Image (cartoon, rainbow, N blue to C red):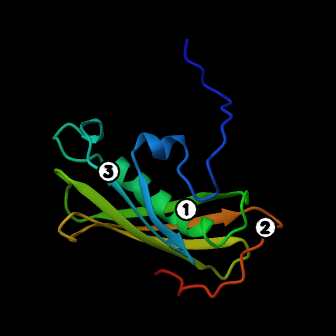
Amino acid sequence: MLFTGPHIFTMDKWISCAPFEKLLNIEIVKAENGEAVLRLPFLHDFAQGAGLMHGGVLVSLADTTVVMAIKSILEPMTHFATIKLETEFFKPIKKGYVTCRGKVGKSYEERILIGSAKIFDEQDQDIAIFNSTFKIAKNAEIKNIKFLDAPK
């Protein structure tokens, strides 16, 4: 019988990979001042039926990239969650590593953050763009930084 939760674990530090992100072999290259860069390899387990990287892996990378950008501006242990996301794919991944660059901007609504990310292949070609909306918990404080322009 499989144990389906609740699962309890601790992370190494505030900006670090959770179990699912470790499963995907995500590497945090940078996460600071509302921006993040993450990357992951195309492993055999990430292939869909035609042998291309599954789109869900790419969406997970983009979502995690924006999460790390958000974590770079929130106090540790602040609760927040993705409430909306949209991805547009341009070309498939057949091999190699993919890199994602993301940023976060503040919305006009209280406790809402707007994120965007771009995914690139090893030749720095656009693979996908990602836009998302996050909601932070009540009473959470955002660090005193200048927000980047809200992503469009």
Q: Nearer the viewer, residue 144 or 30?
A: 30
Can you identify the residue that label 2 sits on? 140
Query: Viewer-proximal residue, 96 or 132?
Result: 96
Q: Amino acid at mark 1?
A: Val
In the rendered image, which residue does mark 3 sit on? 55
Given contact means CB atoms under 8 Å apart, are the residues at marks 3 and 1 in contact? no
101 left or right of 122?
right
Measured in 3D between alpha carbons, the distance from the residue under mark 3 to the one under mark 2, in whole angstroms, is 32 Å
Residue count near mark 1 (Cα–Cα under 10 Å), binned few <14, some 14–19, many ≥20: many
Circle 2 packing at 10 Å, graded few (<14), some (14-19), many (20+), is some
**Of marks 3 and 2, which one's residue comes earlier in the chain?**
3
What mark, if any, has residue 7 been given in the picture?
A: none
Q: Nearer the viewer, mark 3 or mark 2?
A: 2
Which residue type carries mark 2? Ala
Depth check, mark 3 against mark 1: the one in front is: 1
Image point (54%, 63%), residue name? 68
Q: Position of residue 31 (x, y in %)?
A: 52, 68
